[in-house]
Image (cartoon, helix red, strand yellow):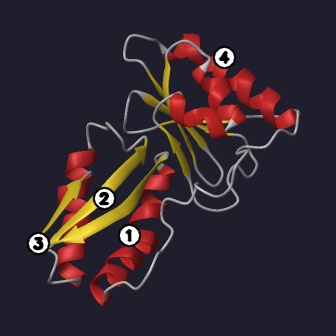
Amino acid sequence: MFIQTEQTPNPATLKFLPGREVMVSGTADFPSVEQARRSPLAERLFGIEGVTGVFFGTDFITVTKDGDKDWHLLKPAILGAIMEHFTAGKPILVETGAAAATADVGEESEIITQIKELIDTRVRPAVAQDGGDIVFDSFEDGVVFLHMQGSCSGCPSSTATLKSGIENMLKHYIPEVLEVRAV
């Protein structure tokens, strides 16, 4: 098994590409070891000293490290854990019910539907290339609240991405949008 790695705009995160599907649908974010209990792979990665976050995308795994640790020391252990997990055929998640953070419940306004569609079609594919995800949280009084995940969480350029990119695009297509903020 050959696992590629890619740098992300966030120097504290690295993107690992195992060359196979990681998540069948959606994403899974584990910002702490406590939240990693539903994933054998995330738990194993958190067992590596210096790992502070794990994020699963469709075909990639993003790992966040403690600022004091060096990638050249962490990378071999992370690669080994990922390789062993996939070659053993273990599941990525052990529960399926609570994993969907973007599940729609009830009726939504037309504006929220438009916001979600723009984020899903124009924003999420672009940030997935950098090892992260941006998920719609809410829309209140003209303000769109978005949840940053993976390499986007804590990224130095995330504010610029939100304000210059996402906010301008949403304002252009949806006049009711006045501002975009991270949750």
Residue 103 spot, x, y in % from top left: 51, 68
Label 4 to label 1: alpha-carbon separation: 35 Å
Q: Kindly state the secondary structure of the residue where label 1 is placed.
A: helix
The reply to whether callout 2 and callout 1 are in contact (CB within 8 Å) is yes
Q: Amino acid at mark 1?
A: Ile
| Residue 178 disc label | 3
Q: Kindly state the secondary structure of the residue where label 3 is placed.
A: loop
Report the residue marked by disc 2: 146
Which numbered disc, 4 or 3, marks the residue that appears first in the sequence? 4
Q: Residue at x 36, y 49 (%)?
A: 148
Up/down of 181 relative to 37, above or below: below
Q: Quadrant of residue 77?
A: top right
Report the residue marked by disc 4: 76
Q: Residue furthest bottom?
A: 110
Left or right: where 142 falls relative to 6: left
Q: Residue at x 44, y 81 (%)?
A: 106
